[in-house]
């Protein structure tokens, strides 16, 4: 997904995902890096449908957890979408470890 297609204002943190970075890169290619006022981030970005996107993000230098954050556009903001996204990524052992309480049904 080309950088700039989705604004940071359009995405919201949905979940923490336990997923192997090496396996992600083997399956989906090398992570891109993005910078904001907080840090430099490893970023895997996907657009499953027109107007929808999800990103797996982790701080490059000092990640606070070994997991990736899963941020999504509004149409994907639900616990079931988080689990489905992890499933379709096709990475053995990947799992959702925490979901944003605001996404609860």
Image (tube, rainbow, N blue to C red):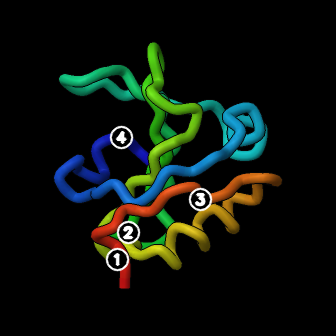
Q: Classify residue 77 by image quadrant.
A: bottom left
Q: Which residue appears farthest toward the bottom when viewing the image?
A: 105
Classify mark 2: residues with Cα within 10 Å, few (<14), some (14-19) or many (20+): some
Tell which tag, 1 or 3, sits nearer the viewer.
Answer: 3
The residue singled out by tag 2 in the image is 52
Above or below: residue 14 compared with residue 50 = above
The residue singled out by tag 1 in the image is 75
Q: First in sequence, mark 1 or 4: give its number.
A: 4
- Real-space CA distance between mark 4 and mark 3, rounded to the nearest whole angstrom: 25 Å
Classify mark 3: residues with Cα within 10 Å, few (<14), some (14-19) or many (20+): many
Query: In the drawing, does residue 92 fall left or right of residue 105?
Result: right
Classify mark 4: residues with Cα within 10 Å, few (<14), some (14-19) or many (20+): few
Query: Are circles 2 and 1 on residues that touch, CB within 8 Å?
Result: yes
Residue 98 visible, this orientation: yes
Residue at disc 3, secondary structure: strand
- Front position in the image: 88 or 29: 88
Q: Which residue appears farthest toward the right when viewing the image?
A: 92
Q: First in sequence, mark 2 or 1: give its number.
A: 2
Query: In the drawing, does residue 20 fall left or right of residue 99?
Result: right
At horizontal 82% and vertical 53% (from top left) the residue drawn is 92
The residue singled out by tag 4 in the image is 3
Tell which tag, 3 or 2, sits nearer the viewer.
Answer: 3
Give the label on residue 96, or none.
Answer: 3
- Real-space CA distance between mark 3 and mark 2, rounded to the nearest whole angstrom: 20 Å
- Real-space CA distance between mark 4 and mark 2, rounded to the nearest whole angstrom: 14 Å
Q: First in sequence, mark 1 or 3: give its number.
A: 1
Residue at disc 2, secondary structure: strand
């Amino acid at each position: 997904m080309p950088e700039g297609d989705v604004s940071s204002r359009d995405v919201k943190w949905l979940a923490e995902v336990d997923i192997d970075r090496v396996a992600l890169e083997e399956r989906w290619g090398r992570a891109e890096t993005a910078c904001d006022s907080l840090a430099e981030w490893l970023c895997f970005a996907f657009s499953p449908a027109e107007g929808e996107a999800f990103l797996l993000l982790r701080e490059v230098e000092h990640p606070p957890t070994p997991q990736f954050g899963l941020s999504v556009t509004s149409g994907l903001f639900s616990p079931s979408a988080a689990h489905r996204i992890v499933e379709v990524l096709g990475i053995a052992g990947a799992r959702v470890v925490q979901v944003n309480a605001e996404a609860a049904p």
